[in-house]
Image (tube, helix red, strand yellow):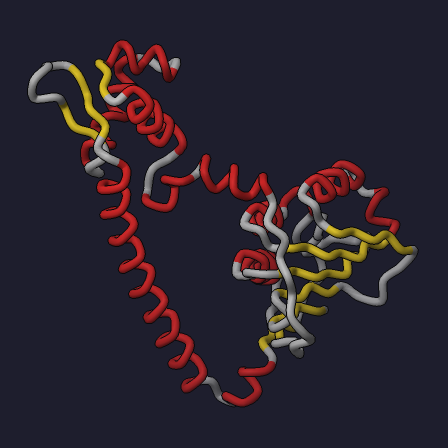
Amino acid sequence: MMYGGGFAPWLFPATAAGSVTRTPRGDVFREGRRLMLGAIGLDEAHESAYRALVSVGAADVPDLARRLTLGEHDTERALRRLERHGLAAQSSSRPGRWVAAPPGVALGALLTQRRHELEKAELAAALLAEEYRATAAEPAVHDLVEVVIGAAAVSQRFLQLQLGATEEVCALVTGNPVAVTGGENDAEEQAADRGVRYRVVLERAALDLPDGLTELTAALGRDEQVRVVDTVPTKLVVADRSLAMVP
């Protein structure tokens, strides 16, 4: 429902204004479960193969292929990928059968490795942020305001603002998108699926845009809070009450 068009120049920290309570949503947990292994490098097809193998304990390729409604070649390729990740192994007692590795052990090892990688990435990000502030021509100003110029840069920062949110995104939305339309704003759905709460004030003219009502229906389906008014004074998006983007 949010549109990123026209957020041309300014990105700055917003003033904190109290706490936010996030309400757990059942669809968030279902989505998290469905994509459980995406965080460790497996796509949906490989996750489905692992889930199927776990459900039966052991299976040969033809049997698993029928369960997955895949060809045997694709099924075996998926099993080989799981084997490389330590999630499956070929049976030593019954040639041709594949056995699922215990999830608690196999997934625990992969998650520990990924947490270590994320900790290293977080440290690197902090060091780069410090280096950026140190080399800025006017560090004090850059800590407050970043000038974002060009449609591509505006679009990228608009999406990053939402993807980086952990609690809440608030927005004023006009009816004249320029850089990102509602249908192109994939970050909104991803953030909402993670449990980020959206509160949006929408200019009535936005409903007259192509897919305007469709986007509104989708937003309401994600439990977003949307209020429609005749006009809004400006475009605005605020993430976690700490970072804002305005024209």
> Which x, y percent locates residue 232?
85, 62
On screen, residue 190 above or below 7: above
Q: Residue at x 28, y 10 (%)?
A: 63
- The answer to whether one can see residue 60 in this image is yes
Which quarter of the picture shows residue 238?
bottom right
Residue 163 in picture, x, y percent from top left: 54, 56
Q: Would residue 151 be seen by someone viewing this image from the given angle?
A: no
The C terminus, quarter of image: bottom right
* Left or right, 125 with reference to 4: left
Say which of 110 and 201 sits in front: 110
Q: Residue furthest right?
A: 230
Work out whether residue 25 or residue 11 is closer to the camera in this orientation and state it: 25
Tell me where residue 246 appears, x and y as whole percent.
70, 69
* Left or right, residue 76 beside residue 226: left
Task: Say which quarter of the image contains residue 5.
Answer: bottom right
Residue 139 percent location from the top left of the image? 50, 88
